[in-house]
């Protein structure tokens, strides 16, 4: 029988990032996933698993979990995150106060014309995917105002690292814009993200927002070229912007239509994290060593 005091940490959406986080946290953590296959995968790693499908009403008693990292993505469509809504209902039904760290995205800032963006920058989500993330943030803030507990919001840049590189895309020879036409993008190495997730729970201000990136924005085309070089794969063929509509997926086109440089100084200052991979070069070297 699970003792709440031994397993008072919960990672909701314990997939690629969550599993690394659970491993870093050690014994007191339970991983919540949607599918039985993922639950078996966690158990095989020695991580106790909880089955919880946030696309249905959640009946689980969450009263034993004091510290919660919420990493589950919103649904694929629409402008809202009803999964977050169901989770917060279950949390409130279970009673007690908790501390929640939310893994959101920098997409909520929308297009910033390549400017530097810190946490005081107003959010202006343009695409549905980003609006769903803004909705999740709003639901969490409302939960905190209702006295649910403490909240730390993370706005996370593109995650890369072992198992999180666009190798399939490169192998398939899919094209990319030229560096001169590609926007700024921001990254964080998976291992550094895990350290930030732990630090945010330990030291993040209640109600605070933190940008999470390595502080070295780069060009999207340069990113694909750098990964190709590090992996020993051909660089993607370059296409003209007027061919982007037919040659690039709608999802990638949406990313290419937004440009911003994410300021990570608050994260470094207040969370006290020293990044192991402050640049893409250092991070990619680590991936292929
Ligand atoms: N990729 C990026 O660059 C980036 C940037 C910023 C933020 N993020 C976000 O970071 C988070 C973690 O990423 P990741 O790579 O670890 O994702 P992942 O490997 O796809 O894991 C997602 C997890 O969420 C669970 N989940 C999905 N739908 C669910 C539902 N309806 N109910 C309950 N659980 C559900 C999955 O469970 P099953 O395995 O059982 O389906 C899985 O455990 C995601 O929210 C992602 O959107 C990603």
Image (tube, rainbow, N blue to C red):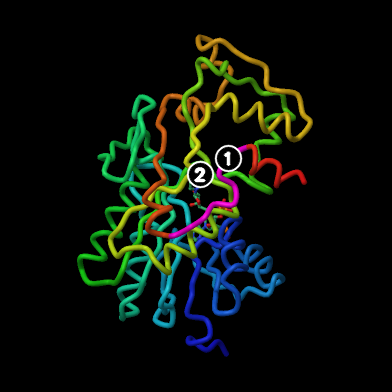
Residue 109: image location, x then y, percent: 33, 38
Q: Is mark 2 within 8 Å of ligand 1?
A: no
**In this picture, residue 36 sits left or right of residue 193:** right
Along the viewing direction, whichever of 51 and 204 lies nearer the viewer: 204
Residue 64 within the segment the image draws in magenta: no
Residue 12: image location, x then y, percent: 49, 65
| Magenta segment, prevailing SS (helix, strand or loop) | loop
Mark 2 near mark 1, Cβ–Cβ under 8 Å? yes
Relative height, residue 268 to residue 95 (above, below):
above
Local secondary structure at mark 1: loop
Magenta segment range?
A: 272-280
Report which quarter residue 237 is drawn in. Answer: top right
- The quarter of the image holding the N terminus is bottom right
* Residue farthest along the left direction in this orientation: 145
Relative height, residue 21 to residue 189 (above, below):
below
Q: Earlier in the sequence, mark 2 or mark 1?
A: 2
- Determine which residue is flagged by label 2: 214
Residue at the location (72% across, 71% down)?
Answer: 44
- Determine which residue is flagged by label 1: 279
Along the viewing direction, whichever of 166 and 275 lies nearer the viewer: 275
Residue at the location (41% across, 45% down)?
Answer: 264
């Amino acid at each position: 029988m699970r003792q709440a005091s031994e397993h008072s940490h919960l990672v909701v959406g314990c997939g690629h990032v969550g599993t690394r986080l659970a491993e870093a946290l050690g014994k007191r953590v339970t991983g919540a996933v949607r599918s039985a296959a993922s639950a078996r995968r966690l158990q095989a790693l020695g991580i106790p698993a909880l089955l919880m499908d946030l696309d249905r009403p959640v009946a689980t008693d969450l009263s034993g979990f004091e510290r919660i990292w919420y990493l589950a993505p919103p649904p694929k469509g629409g402008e809202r995150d009803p999964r977050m809504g169901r989770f917060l209902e279950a949390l409130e039904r279970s009673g007690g106060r908790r501390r929640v760290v939310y893994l959101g995205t920098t997409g909520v800032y929308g297009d910033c014309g390549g400017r530097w963006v810190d946490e005081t920058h107003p959010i202006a989500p343009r695409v549905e995917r980003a609006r769903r993330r803004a909705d999740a943030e709003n639901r969490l803030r409302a939960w905190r105002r209702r006295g649910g507990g403490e909240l730390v919001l993370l706005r996370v840049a593109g995650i890369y690292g072992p198992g999180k590189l666009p190798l399939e895309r490169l192998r398939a020879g899919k094209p990319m814009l030229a560096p001169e036409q590609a926007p700024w993008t921001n990254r964080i190495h998976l291992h550094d993200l895990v350290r930030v997730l732990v630090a945010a729970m330990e030291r993040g201000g209640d109600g605070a927002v933190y940008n999470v990136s390595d502080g070295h924005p780069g060009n999207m085309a340069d990113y694909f070229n750098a990964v190709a070089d590090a992996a020993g794969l051909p660089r993607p063929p370059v296409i003209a912007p007027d061919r982007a509509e037919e040659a690039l997926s709608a999802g990638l086109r949406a990313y290419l239509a937004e440009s911003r440089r994410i300021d990570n100084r608050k994260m470094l200052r207040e969370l006290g994290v020293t990044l192991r991979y402050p640049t893409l070069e250092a991070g990619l070297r680590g991936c292929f060593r």
